[in-house]
């Protein structure tokens, strides 16, 4: 029997009492994990961004169809006499939550902060040479060369108030991996549609309507009660009992049951996110293996054997209950550069995999620890358990180390893992976002999530060229060349693209967002 912990039970009780008898404008929103931090430039992570989008805003945004739309910038264009410079025209009359006016100076400060050394967002701005305010409502971003896709990189770069940041000593970005704290980690001052009222990390946060927001039509939701509930059964029980109104991460085993439950409905749709495994490259022995000389993952035969041991279709059918789309490439179909040919994957072949292990010099296999999150992606721990079992058939004995994403993510970014599961969304809808973070050598602005430390200088040069290539045909040909190498080298082991399910009480409508970042401003009430 599932038991609700005392802190969570108290939180749910307080929330129920708070909204008891209230109108439908309050949404009690349950997620599997909490935002890692409230410092808006510290972590490039989906749940963290999703929380922040309600409080802070970006220059541009995407709708549920994936189209770019204005937010704090009303329009943007390449400068007529300088194709290296983007001009952003800002929205007039916007104020921060503390009443301070929003100006170009705040944009300059925020973009410079986002591309600073400690920022986990800096790779999105790697081609930026300088940012300057022309006047209070105009900003010019000069690139190292023509960069026609740069606005696509801005959908998760939030704008902060320079004066508030300076007054509260948060000019520098939080160093999350080092466990650093700062005022912006738990306090906010954005221009967004909601104002943070209270926050208890991993338990409960409350946001209320920003009465001074610039939007002409206020959202139907006037209060958000954010409830991180890591345990799947507890999260669904809270929905069925009426203690929460919306569950974003619905376990695949519960979709059919909820669809048949009175007073509940479920919305499903594909996410712009791939689930994959990464592994350590390099000459040093793996920390968690019984192989003390050399690194088995350096062997192309071992990586091929692992792919042949993994049964993606079985994972889709058994682990995901059909709620996934198996893939052979580490990018979703939404993304420029994806093709049917890249998406193909081999059928499992255990005999051939064993032959490859022997050819690589590991006829008896080896041991390794697999690090996995247990509250970030749909059935993440179960996927890792299944893959561990499949690899065991070819002699790779896997020890599973399962953690909440708040502890898992730093293992990857600090390269302190031999073998790991991760999911990757692509908010730019372009392959360069995958290459910049996951494939490029970890150096400078690149390779932030290259947890395996893969390095290919020739490929690095091609990846960097994508940032300033203006000829679409040439650029797409380079993307295809990079994918050919990435797939041929098996730099990553992709499993599937996520399919999302949102469950909510009857009378609430919320479409599935392709980046799994729904805004409560999109909620409509039908009763």
Image (cartoon, rainbow, N blue to C red):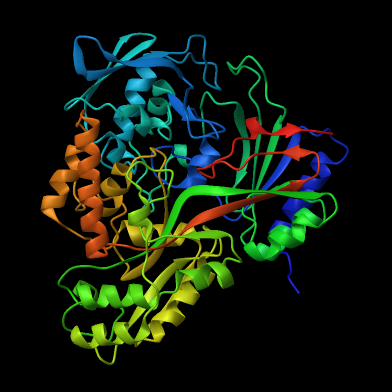
Where residue 433 sits in the image (x, y, percent)?
A: 32, 43
The residue most toward the bottom is 364
Above or below residue 389? Residue 509 is above
Where is residue 476 drawn, in percent x and y?
A: 25, 39
| Residue 286 appears in the rendering | no
The image quadrant that residue 145 belongs to is top left
Residue at the image point whose x is 35% and y is 27% from the top: 151
Image side of residue 89 versus residue 48, left or right: left
In the figure, is residue 235 to the left or right of 115? right
Q: Which residue lies furthest to the right in this view?
A: 21
Residue 477 appears left or right of 42: left
Residue at x-position 28% and y-position 56%: 450
Residue at point 67% right, 21% down?
A: 218
Let me know if residue 260 appears in the view. yes
Image quarter of the N terminus? bottom right
Return the x and y of residue 235 as percentages of the image width and height.
Answer: 69, 58
Q: Up-down: is 12 above or below 104?
A: below
Q: How far from the left and from the top, in percent, is residue 267?
A: 67, 47
Q: Quadrant of the C terminus?
A: top right
What is the residue that sits farthest to the front in this orientation? Answer: 341
Up-down relation of residue 322 to residue 222 (above or below): below
Q: Looking at the image, is 244 positioned above or below residue 524?
A: below
Q: Which of 228 and 140 is in front in this view?
A: 140
Count every numbered label the image shows and give the total. 0
Which of the 4 quarters of the picture holds residue 282?
bottom left
Is 45 positioned to the left or the right of 27 in the image? Answer: left
Q: Which residue lies furthest to the top in this view?
A: 135
């Amino acid at each position: 029997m599932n038991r609700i912990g005392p802190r969570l039970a108290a939180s749910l009780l307080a929330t129920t009492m708070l909204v008891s008898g209230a109108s439908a404008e309050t949404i009690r929103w349950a997620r599997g994990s909490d935002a890692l931090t409230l410092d808006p430039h510290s972590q490039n992570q989906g749940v963290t961004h999703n929380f922040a989008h309600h409080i802070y805003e970006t220059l541009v945004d995407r709708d549920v169809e994936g189209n770019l739309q204005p937010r704090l910038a009303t329009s943007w264009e390449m400068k007529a006499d300088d194709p290296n410079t983007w001009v952003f025209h800002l929205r007039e009359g916007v104020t921060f939550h503390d009443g301070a006016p929003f100006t170009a100076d705040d944009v300059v400060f925020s973009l410079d902060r986002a591309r600073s050394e400690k920022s986990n967002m800096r790779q999105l701005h790697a081609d930026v040479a300088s940012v300057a305010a022309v006047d209070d409502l105009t900003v010019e971003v000069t690139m190292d060369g023509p960069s026609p896709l740069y606005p696509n990189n801005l959908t998760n770069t939030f704008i902060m108030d320079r004066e508030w940041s300076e007054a509260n000593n948060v000019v520098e970005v939080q160093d999350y991996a080092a466990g650093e704290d700062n005022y912006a980690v738990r306090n906010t001052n954005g221009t967004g549609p909601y104002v943070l009222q209270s926050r208890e990390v991993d338990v409960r946060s409350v946001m209320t309507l920003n009465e001074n927001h610039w939007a002409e039509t206020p959202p139907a939701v006037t209060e958000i009660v954010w409830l991180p509930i890591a345990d799947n059964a507890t999260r669904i029980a809270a929905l069925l009992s009426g203690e929460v109104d919306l569950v974003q991460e619905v376990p695949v085993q519960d979709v059919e049951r909820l669809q048949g439950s009175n007073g509940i409905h479920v919305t499903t749709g594909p996410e712009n996110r791939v689930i994959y495994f990464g592994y350590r490259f390099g000459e040093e022995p793996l920390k968690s293996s019984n192989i003390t000389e050399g690194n088995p993952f350096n062997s192309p035969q071992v990586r091929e054997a692992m792919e042949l041991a993994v049964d993606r279709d079985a994972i889709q059918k058994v682990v995901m209950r059909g709620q996934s789309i198996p893939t052979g490439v580490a990018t979703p179909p939404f993304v420029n550069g994806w093709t049917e040919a890249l998406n193909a994957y081999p059928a499992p072949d255990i005999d051939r995999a064993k032959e490859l292990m022997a050819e690589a010099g590991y006829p008896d296999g080896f041991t390794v620890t697999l690090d996995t999150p247990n509250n970030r992606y749909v059935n993440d721990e179960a996927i890792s358990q299944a893959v561990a079992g499949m690899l065991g058939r070819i002699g790779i004995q896997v020890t599973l180390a399962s953690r909440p994403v708040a502890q898992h993510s730093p293992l990857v970014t600090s390269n302190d893992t031999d073998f790991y599961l991760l999911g990757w969304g692509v908010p730019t809808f372009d392959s360069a976002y995958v290459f910049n973070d996951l494939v490029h050598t970890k150096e400078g602005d690149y390779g932030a999530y290259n947890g395996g430390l893969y390095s290919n200088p020739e490929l690095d040069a091609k990846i960097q060229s994508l940032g300033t290539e203006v000829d679409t045909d040439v650029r797409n040909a380079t993307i295809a060349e990079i994918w050919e190498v990435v797939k041929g080298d098996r730099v990553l082991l992709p499993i599937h693209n996520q399919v999302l399910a949102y469950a909510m009480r009857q009378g609430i409508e919320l479409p599935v967002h392709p980046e799994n970042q729904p805004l409560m401003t999109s909620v409509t009430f039908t009763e």
